[in-house]
Amino acid sequence: MAGVAIKEAGAGRSLSLEQVENGSLSTSPSYWDSDDDGGPKPSDLFGMYTWKIYKFSQINKRELRSNAFEVGGYKWYILIYPHGCDVCNHLSLFLCVANHDKLLPGWSHFAQFTISVVNKDPKKSRYSDTLHHFWKKEHDWGWKKFMELSKVQDGFIDADVLIIKAQVQVIRGRLDRPFRCLDCQYRRELITVYLKNVEQICRCFVEERRTKLGKLLEDKAKWSSFCAFWLGMDQSDRRRMSREKSKSILKVVVKQFFIEKEVTSTLVLDTLYSGLKALEGQNKGKKSSSKYLEAEELPIPIVGIENDTFILADDVLLLLEWVATERLPPRDEKDPQNRTKDGIVGEEFNKYSIERDERRLTECGRQTIEIFVLSRIFSNIEAAYQEDVVLKKQEELIREEEACLGETERKSRRGVDKKKNIQRETFEGELLRQQRHTGRPRCGGSERANDGLHLRLGRGITTSCRRGVTAGDAIMGVQAAIGRGGGFRVWEGANTDDNEISTMETTTTQQVMERGKGKKTSGAGQRKNTYEEPLTLDN
């Protein structure tokens, strides 16, 4: 009832470039089926399987399984639900890992596969492609609504036989750099369907990065500041920052473009791989290993590769200006050829169309790699520039703060000095005025120690100065008295020419000061103060 299973050769049918030129169609350049790490070739991980189900109209089982077949070191089978899986009136198809419960713990692998239901008219055959990460909890993958049952009778069943084909490409687990993912013939078939999608992905990335770089140039002040920063660096520092190890960049490239369950991810990685090889060929001063990039068509290089290191081909400022203003080449709107029954190209698919598509993808991959590398190196330089800007702002703020503090200190010092000078001048002037007012000669010596000049200032604190204290000390005493909220009294009894005034003492008695032989009076018997108004010094 289930019919006969036929297994086709799993080894890839990669042909040389000479075979293409001799009429055997192939999409591969010389490095098509190889990679740098010496691992298994994509053709070794690719297989096709054809399952013929006889007497399909008489099947009444819920599901059918094909025989197991091996691809990429794993065993697989096709699972079909003739009347739908959890859906009605649809044919459901899945690809499953056989004996998944007996595999070692932790097993997993990516696989891209295509399942097709063959029609008598090859152009009407139904295809579905997907990329999936198979592991313990997701060991089967496919489509519940592969096609409507009503359409199965429309040329898909011939003599009550339904033919289902599976193409399986196991993706090896190397995700540290772009690598060749697909067998050349399987890739050729996918290109006929997804060429524009791959180009769109790469062009969108390039346009996004170019727009970001262009915004820097539009900001004239920032661009001028960035140029000054870059040109102010040592030549050795500029050379160091204009390069980066290819390993670190390519790992990020894979992370950027390899998206699980995105069917075009493998084609994008193949495209980037071709572009990377083209860059390596350019760097060696030879024609690209791919014959599809003619020497006269090679664009101006942006980056080169030397000793596993990406190096900018020119000064970063010139490259940024060129990338931001250069226009992308126009899109090639010519559609690729249609898919055919056997998953290979039809006779109308000639050598020119193959080379044209490969040239488009290789150039697309090269340009994407170059823009990615330039953006990555520029981001490192920009980070250093931003750090330099922050440091300069901090230094400027520190200088402004120091200048402000210095000015405040100078103003404060000038105010204190001015206040001291005013107090000193007031005190000394009052001494001289009182001496002139009394009309007594200046006296010195112990014989006149009891004579004094009585001065009352303020609110009840009296200060007397006696022999042995200089005028400066007396002034300090007066300031102290003022600070306590009172006045002061000075007894004359020293040689003021030598600025010597007797020792200072402070009392709290409120006195009316008079000139006399050192005598103090109080109450109703006080003599009238020599001065009509007491002298008050504000603190």
Image (spheres, grey):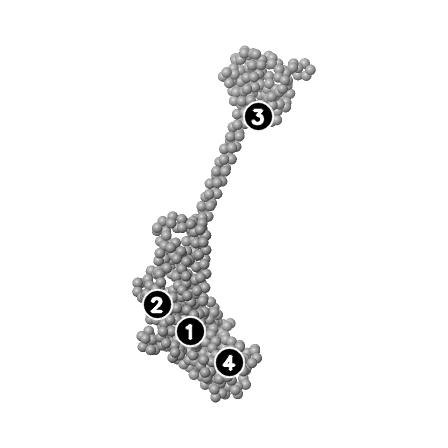
Tell me where residue 528 appears, x and y as whole percent.
65, 15
Tell me where residue 494 appears, x and y as whole percent.
53, 15
Q: Quadrant of residue 305?
A: bottom left
Tell me where residue 217 appears, x and y as whole percent.
43, 54
Q: Nearer the viewer, residue 237 or 342?
A: 342
Q: Are marks 1 and 3 in contact (CB under 8 Å)?
A: no
The mark found on residue 80 in the picture is 4
Amino acid tagged 2: Leu
Q: Label 1, on which residue?
A: 336
Residue plotted at (59% across, 19% down): 489
Q: Disc 4 and disc 3: Cα gap in Å?
A: 107 Å
Q: Is residue 274 visible?
A: yes
Q: Label 2, on which residue?
A: 293
Q: Which tag, 3 or 2, sits closer to the chain's start? A: 2
Q: Which tag, 4 or 1, sits closer to the chain's start? A: 4
Q: Disc 4 and disc 2: Cα gap in Å?
A: 45 Å
The residue mark sitting in front, 4 or 3, is: 4
Query: Is the residue 151 above or below the residue 29 in the image?
Result: below
Q: Disc 3 and disc 2: Cα gap in Å?
A: 96 Å
- 152 sits left or right of 173 in the view: right
Q: Nearer the viewer, residue 513 or 376?
A: 376
Amino acid tagged 4: Ile
The mark found on residue 480 in the picture is 3
Q: Disc 4 and disc 1: Cα gap in Å?
A: 31 Å
Furthest-right residue in this view = 524
